[in-house]
Image: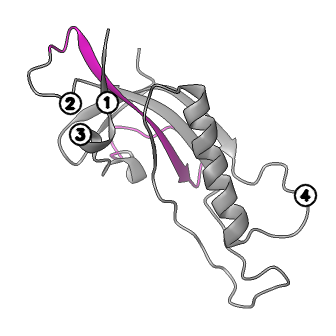
């Protein structure tokens, strides 16, 4: 059973079957977020997603990077990512034409960032997820 369904701008519907939400800066004790640290966070999130399901392709939705202060500190300018890191596994009908939807499905793990810890819904089009190029990113699997 799907946790939620999202209608992509391409017209395809995808279903969220597994999700992990975590605080983007959970455990951050000192200093402030900068571009290099955020780049490492993105790399780590992608690596963890690949390790969790090695056969499923992984895609990062580029997060919005906020620059709240133009004054650089000792480590450079402050750069803040949205508060919640999300990793979700989505499925849909097959991407390859002619594949039987009873025997095949397509899957993609997506890493994205959002401001609140809520699941995307059909009504909001999945916000950052609505423009996923599913046919280019997902892979087909036989049941």
Tag 1 and tag 4, C-beta contact below 8 Å: no
Tag 4 and tag 3, C-beta contact below 8 Å: no
Front-most of 9 and 102? 102
Residue drawn at x 90%, y 58% is: 29
Element type at marker 2? Answer: loop
Quadrant including the N terminus: top left
Q: Label 4: few (<14), some or many (≥20) within 10 Å?
A: few
Which x, y percent locates residue 131?
30, 52
Tag 1 and tag 2, C-beta contact below 8 Å: yes
Which x, y percent locates residue 63?
52, 60
- Which mark sits nearer the N-terminus, 3 or 2? 2
| Residue that label 3 marks | 135
Q: In whole angstroms, how far apart are the C-alphas of marks 3 and 2?
A: 6 Å
| Residue that label 4 marks | 29
Looking at the image, residue 90 sits to the left or right of residue 70; the answer is left
Residue drawn at x 79%, y 49% is: 26
């Amino acid at each position: 059973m799907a946790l939620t369904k999202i209608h992509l701008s391409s017209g395809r519907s995808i279903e969220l079957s597994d999700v992990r939400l975590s605080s983007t800066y959970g455990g951050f004790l000192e200093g402030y977020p900068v571009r290099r640290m955020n780049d490492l966070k993105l790399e780590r999130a992608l690596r963890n997603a690949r390790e969790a399901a090695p056969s499923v392709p992984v895609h990062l939705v580029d997060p919005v990077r906020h620059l709240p202060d133009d004054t650089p500190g000792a480590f450079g300018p402050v750069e803040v990512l949205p508060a919640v890191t999300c990793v979700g596994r989505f499925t849909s009908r097959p991407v390859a034409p002619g594949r039987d939807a009873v025997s095949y499905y397509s899957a993609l793990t997506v890493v994205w960032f959002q401001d609140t810890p809520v699941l995307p819904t059909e009504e909001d089009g999945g916000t950052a997820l609505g423009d996923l190029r599913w046919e280019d990113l997902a892979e087909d699997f036989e049941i």
